[in-house]
Image: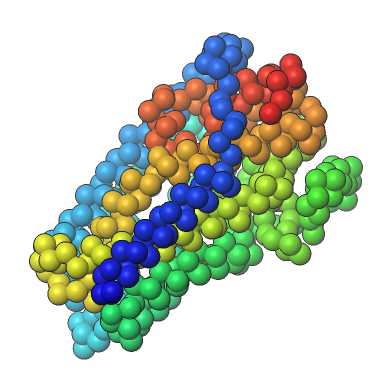
Amino acid sequence: MTTRTWAAVTLFALVVALVVVVLLLVPWNDPAAPRAEQLAALRDLPADDVERGRAFHAALRPGSYGALAVGLVVALLLGLTPLGAKLVALGGRPFGDHWIAQALVGGLVVVLVADLVTLPFAAWRHAVVSRHGLSTQGWGGWTADLLKSYVVSAVIGGVALLVFYTVTRLAPRWWWALGAAGAAVLVVLLSLILPVVVEPVFNRFTPMAQGPLRTELMALAERDGAPVRDVLVADASRRTRAVNAYVSGIGPTRRIVVYDTLLREATPGEVKTVVAHELGHTSNDDVFTGTLIGALGAAAAVVTVFLLGSWGGLLRAAGVDSIAEPRAFPLLLAVVAVGALVATPVQALVSRQVERRADVHALTLTGDPATFEAMQRRLFAVNLGDPDPPPWHQLWSASHPSTVQRIAAARAFAEGDRP
């Protein structure tokens, strides 16, 4: 078989494996509560809080979708015209047009241009969040976090670019196979190291003080079969009033992380409910499932890029001779941008199903649907949530069930309708 045929067969196998994993490991037997029960939950929420949440998200959506549209247009403009290739070449010119300089400097320049074009939308979002009182961070702190994210992205992206284009030079016919394997490994590595290495860049973590709540959280994790090393408190209040908690790390590095805002706003029982939800992700191996899906998806994306890269029309439009050369990086980004756009609603659907199962886990573990409902009310009020977003928005990008869906599920659980 030809190299292209091998790539096509590999892509088919990866897609089949991805579909099988999604069908088998993602829960599909937990439907949302009936619409009538959701509307009943909505009527019970304070009207003022509902109005504030809806106004907040109505103000956010134009910027969110504007950034998406502009980002896509810029990616297509750079990738489907010679402009992107010229930008990469410009980045490598001071270094004698060496391929490493084109890959690193030129590639990062392209990414920086795309980020700068969408920067006004990020600033718009911060302005909206600040105006509605959810952010405690001034423009100086926001800028510092933005620069930190750029540095982290540049380091990870630079390593990925250097490895990728080294492989394309060493294995010009089979780089797609090595690249697919490398992309899958990168997803796994990021899943392992981001919580330990990157999280401390943006937050400070301190052990929760000894006391009843810490003891109860440790005991809750032990009872759930997911013992944790520690309970940490994140200083989220220096940038937001939003409340949250999560379980981070794997095995001996696993720890419960609680926002200091959550401790300030919620009752101990509500904190336990949030942690029980997060423990549900650990109990159901959701991190493993998400990592596996991401690894298969990344590998499939690399093979797809290789197959599309043999399409002469795309190469001519981009002004390059091969998808494997550094000057074709903008074309690669354009393909990835379109793929991400198509994948967004699918990823959102998978995430909602996983989050719904974690809700059921929390209800089962605590046996306290009343506190679960109270926590959902608090999350919605403090985080300025939209309790019942428009269906099109929910289907397109919502990673969690809506507030009214979660409250209706808790009420059904209390009445004995348990999955």
Residue at 39% x, 44% y is 344
Q: Is 102 displayed left or right of 27 in the figure?
A: left
- Look at the picture and state if 374 lies above or below 366: above
Counting from the top left corner in percent of width and height, residue 237 is at 63, 45
Q: Say which quarter of the image contains residue 61.
A: top left
Q: Say which quarter of the image contains residue 278.
A: top right
**Residue 401 visible in image:** yes
Figure disc tally: 0
Counting from the top left corner in percent of width and height, residue 408 is at 62, 20
Q: Is 142 displayed left or right of 92 in the figure?
A: right
Q: Is 236 displayed left or right of 138 in the figure?
A: right
Residue at 43% x, 54% y is 16
- Look at the picture and state if 366 lies above or below 121: above
Q: Seen from this angle, which residue lies furthest front?
A: 1
Counting from the top left corner in percent of width and height, residue 21 is at 52, 51
- Look at the picture and state if 29 lies above or below 188: above
**Residue 101 visible in image:** no
Towards the viewer: 350 or 110: 350
Q: Say which quarter of the image contains residue 94.
A: bottom left
Image quadrant containing the C terminus = top right
Towards the viewer: 363 or 297: 297
Towards the viewer: 339 or 95: 339
Counting from the top left corner in percent of width and height, residue 370 is at 75, 22
- Look at the picture and state if 110 lies above or below 365: below
